[in-house]
Amino acid sequence: MDIAKRAKQISPSLTLEITARAKKMKADGMRVVSFAAGEPDFNTPEYILDAGRKALDLGLTKYTPAAGTVELRNAICQKLKNDNALDYDKSNIVVSNGAKHSLFNAFMAILDPGDEVIIPSPYWLSYPEIVKMAGGVPVFVETKPENSFKLTPAEFESAVTKKTKALILNNPNNPTGAVYTRSELNALGATIEKYEIFVVSDEIYEKLTYERRHHSIAAYSDILKERTVVINGMSKTYSMTGWRVGYAAADEQIASAMSSMQSHSTSNANTIAQYASCVALSDKYHGDAFLEDMRATFDARRALMMLRLHRLGMQYIEPKGAFYIMVNIKDYIGKRIEGQRIDSAFDFASLLLEQVQVAVIPCESFGAPEYIRMSYAASEKDIERGLDAMGSFLSQLHD
Ligand SMILES: Cc1ncc(COP(=O)(O)O)c(C=O)c1O
């Protein structure tokens, strides 16, 4: 007996291998500095924890509508209106078990077998796997470091075929840290609108931007809004990764398909977490204070990271959003340390961990084989210590 072809085409993650090794080293008592984190190193703010406790006291422990409570969907509509200039009704909103689940539902709702989905590269490693699980075919389009890895209209058009069904736009971007300006989105929007395709706009890092604010491509025009599925969630904005609440905003036909499929698979997202998410979004006073503190902290770490990488002579892409920085390791390919040769970003990350106990993510699975991704969801002390260790590693490399 064989398992499904669908299951066999899902790639195992190289990322997990490095993080699993780093965790094991830590468990064995070694001091590891990790730049691998994909979640903010902040506690969920107290006002949200209080709301979670209150939900239990109120006995909110039963099913809710599959698409989410009316209160939460209304709060999401309000948020989308205030922050993104997008008008939606609660019938356009589907709350799921994290943005990843929202993405899965979205592709299940819009793809037929063999439909192509354009994925600008570098990309978040789950996109191609989710597209494949939903029967689609990922089509990668290279973006350029000189454009800060942002998709241009010409690059987009070069990837469109008769089979194109959707484009994924991740803004702010994981792993590149790119944030599109409004004029860049306008240019992209005008081009995308010429084609009958959907846009899946992953805006999960929306609130973590530096120097410029985020804009949603869905706000470009009513036509594009109708064809766009906006994906967002609580994980990164409110440091609620473990609560598992994400959401999608889409045209009613898509939202209703997503909700029906969810009703037959996972049902509603956790009721207690939905209640807490509603409070998280509605209490602007506490929410804004938390966010501004977290954003300012990340911004200071971003500056420190760039300064230290610059001093080491490493090439990086200046991030404008999220909490990752992509560092080019091409110059170290072919070098050796302790008799072992670096032939890939994976080797670089692997040897860095082994030799100086610093964990970074190799970007092969993100479509950027010459890069590593370093997360600055780490304290300034760890950034200093980790980059000292990285300096020592680089100084030991030889031909
Ligand atoms: C680009 C991107 N989209 C979506 C997600 C998933 O977030 P959630 O925790 O809401 O599933 C992540 C998490 O790392 C991400 O980096």
Image: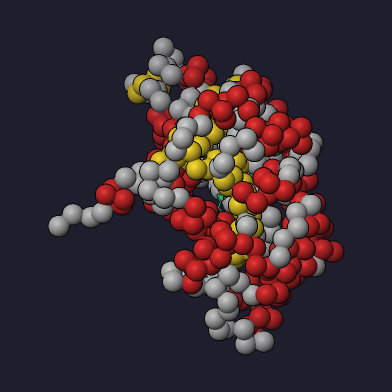
Q: Residue at x 73, y 35 (%)?
A: 186
Viewer-proximal residue among 377 and 60: 60
Above-or-below relation of 168 to 330: below
Left or right of residue 244: residue 353: left
Q: Tag count in the figure?
A: 0
Viewer-proximal residue among 146 and 31: 146
Q: Percent from the top left, x then y, of residue 150?
A: 63, 30
Left or right of residue 324: residue 142: left
Above-or-below relation of 202 to 351: below
Quadrant (top left, top right, bottom left, bottom right) of the N terminus:
bottom left
Q: Percent from the top left, x then y, of residue 391?
A: 57, 25
Viewer-proximal residue among 223 and 389: 223
Q: Percent from the top left, x then y, of residue 130?
A: 44, 49
Quadrant (top left, top right, bottom left, bottom right) of the C terminus:
top left
Viewer-proximal residue among 5 and 40: 5
- Residue 98 in view in this figure: no
Q: What sort of colour scheme is used for the picture?
A: secondary structure
